Amino acid sequence: MDNDSLTQRDLRVVWHPCTQMHDHETLPPIPIRRGQGVWLEDFDGKRYLDAISSWWVNLFGHANPRINAAIADQLQNLEHVILAGFTHEPVVQLSERLTQIAPKGLARCFYADSGSAAVEIALKMSFHYWHNRGEKKRTRFINLANSYHGETLGALGVGDVALYKETYRPLLLEAITVKSPDGYHREPGESRADYSTRAFAAMEAVLARHAGEVCAVIVEPLVQCAGGMRMYDPVYLKLLRQACDKHGVHLIADEIAVGFGRTGTMFACEQAGIAPDFLCLGKGLTGGYLPLSVCLTTDEVYQAFYANYTARKAFLHSHSYTGNPLACRAALATLDIFRDDDVINRNRELAGHMARATAPLVDHPHVAEVRQTGMILAIEMVREKKTRAPYPWQERRGLSVYRHALERGVLLRPLGDVIYFMPPYVIKPEEIELLARVAWEGVDRATA
Ligand code: PMP
């Protein structure tokens, strides 16, 4: 088997996600034979550094021996069992541990199989909570401009990235969209914290006006990832928690991308010292091995559904593979690594290394900003540094960075013209330097 033969077969039968398949006429998909640590290897033996953790899921490398062993062990006993009416040890253990490490008050775990499904659950649960309490006028959600929460219809409805949303708008629920605290828009000399505080006025006004018809506010804490790795200050979350309490509205924290150490703390909400009413987790939950997601919520929410069957208050949502035992074991092994290897502290050094290695890019004539929150670093490429005028999207400058990086054996997958690093936590300093070099070359060529 070589790259070409598998690619030809692929292009006859596979429809790839988030892809204009026509692009593959000039840039075929790369068939991967094996992964090891931060490296992927194709069928011709070429290696690629997985700088984006395979869509932000991988935490401790491909073929991690500890996660491999946990899944193999689980396979000997139970691959799957229905979670309605039955249970199993991995799901009980995982729920115990998640409720221990999550922000205070999150005491119940409801499982699903993708991030989008976890978001759907949070939306439905919040709505249903108010419904069970007799507050039937609450049908709306507040979201932030430039937010992203997944691709299913409910999740798209509370997202705000036009590229993914616009076509489907007639099918979607209508969120109330509020100005984003995204620090990219701050005035020269203004701090991210000041800008985020200033941006909060818009949220306060909308909450004051609409609180009675709103179920929840949904946000991506600290980093709007799919929206171009746009970052904001924790103060916004603090103000938001206070305002949600004041106006009697739920707060949904979508930490599907930013949870599990990405922002420098186990959960991004910790940096604001707040706990949401719903916490959505996915992606890194299984270390990047298996599809599993979870929506954690409070005992107060749980109690609003707890009643005699005939009261018709139950949450009857389900997915076939909910709480899959293999995935739960992968998640438990992932949590063990966090506990045993002092990951959060070690990441601080890696994050410092990412900052130092990319420092020269700050002065590049076509880089508007190099920004970082923990283990996420983003480089915003623009046509004009001074005005921050972007390149016309049709020019697809980010794509040429992607192509250059592939040639150099690095998987960078820019979001438009934003090049970012979101590597597995087992990356080495010299590999970070390679990333920074390739990013510099890529930006330089794409803007020449
Ligand atoms: N929420 C956020 C913040 C995400 O980044 C993503 C995925 N990129 C999702 C939800 C959706 O997760 P999934 O792709 O697993 O459905």
Image (tube, rainbow, N blue to C red):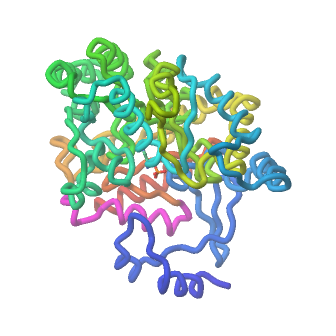
Given residues 95 and 19, the one toward you in this image is 95
- Residue 80 in percent (x, y) is at 71, 54
Q: Can residue 356 be seen in this view?
A: no
Q: Is residue 433 left or right of residue 17?
A: right
Given residues 347 and 210, the one toward you in this image is 210
Against 155, residue 47 (above or below) is: below
Quarter of the rendering containing residue 20: bottom left
Q: Is residue 380 left or right of residue 54?
A: left
Q: In this view, does 296 lie to the left or right of 192?
A: right
Is residue 399 magenta-colored? yes
Question: Which quadrant is home to the N terminus?
Answer: bottom right
Main SS category, magenta section: helix
Given residues 210 and 16, the one toward you in this image is 210
Q: In this view, does 265 lie to the left or right of 335?
A: left
The residue at the point 84 percent across, 50 percent down is 73
- Residue 161 in percent (x, y) is at 27, 49
Against 60, residue 212 (above or below) is: above
Against 419, residue 102 (above or below) is: above
- Residue 162 in percent (x, y) is at 23, 53
Q: What stretch is highlighted in magenta?
A: 391-410
The residue at the point 68 percent across, 28 percent down is 97
The image shows a total of numbered marks equal to 0
